Amino acid sequence: MKNLFLLVTLASLSLSTTSFAVETMGEKVQDKANDLQRATSEKMNRLGEAVCMESDAECLAKKANNRAEEAEEATKDKATELKNKIDD
């Protein structure tokens, strides 16, 4: 039983190796540009939310929409970064 457990453990460890790929310089620059663009967008959204003069419901709706857009952009960027790391 111990041998079987050891064999299964070693097999799973050998099969679950992570790929150690290196991003190209262009991909790293693109990642930094995406991070900067997301940060800028986030700051502009926060500024717009702070000065919102509409009703509370409308301000909350805009805030929720901003958060959803930010999450979508972050997810897309991180997926692209992961793809770039694996592709190389």
Image (cartoon, rainbow, N blue to C red):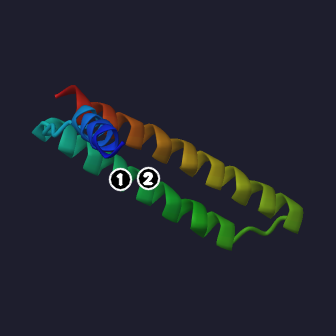
Q: Locate residue 60, reporting x and y percent.
A: 79, 62
**Residue 78 seen in the current view:** yes
Residue tagged 2? 38
Side of 44 relative to 1 (left or right): right
Q: Which quadrant of the view contains residue 63?
A: bottom right
Q: Is residue 5 above or below residue 86?
A: below
Q: What residue do we see at 31% from left, 39% from top?
A: 81
Choose between 30 and 12: the one closer to the eye: 12
Residue reaching furthest to the top:
87
* Secondary structure under the numbered disc 1 in the rendered image: helix
Q: What residue do we see at 34% from left, 55% from top?
A: 36
The image's mark for residue 16 is none
Choose between 52 and 42: the one closer to the eye: 42
Q: Which quadrant of the view contains residue 58?
A: bottom right
Q: Is residue 34 above or below residue 24?
A: below
Question: What's the amino acid at mark 2?
Answer: Arg
Residue reaching furthest to the front:
1
Side of 55 relative to 52 (left or right): right
Q: What residue do we see at 20% from left, 37% from top?
A: 27
Image quarter (top left, top right, bottom left or bottom right) of the N terminus: top left
Side of 40 relative to 9 (left or right): right
Q: Locate residue 64, reporting x and y percent.
A: 72, 55
Task: Tell me if mark 1 has few (under 14), some (14-19) or many (20+) residues whose alpha carbon lies within 10 angstroms of its own.
Answer: some
Q: Locate residue 7, reporting x and y percent.
A: 27, 37
The image's mark for residue 35 is 1
* Secondary structure under the numbered disc 2 in the rendered image: helix
Question: What's the amino acid at mark 1?
Answer: Asp
Task: Kindly indicate whether the residue at mark 1 contacts the one at mark 2 (C-beta within 8 angstroms).
Answer: yes
Choose between 77 and 17: the one closer to the eye: 17
Side of 37 relative to 16 (left or right): right
* Distance between mark 2 and mark 1 Cα atoms: 5 Å
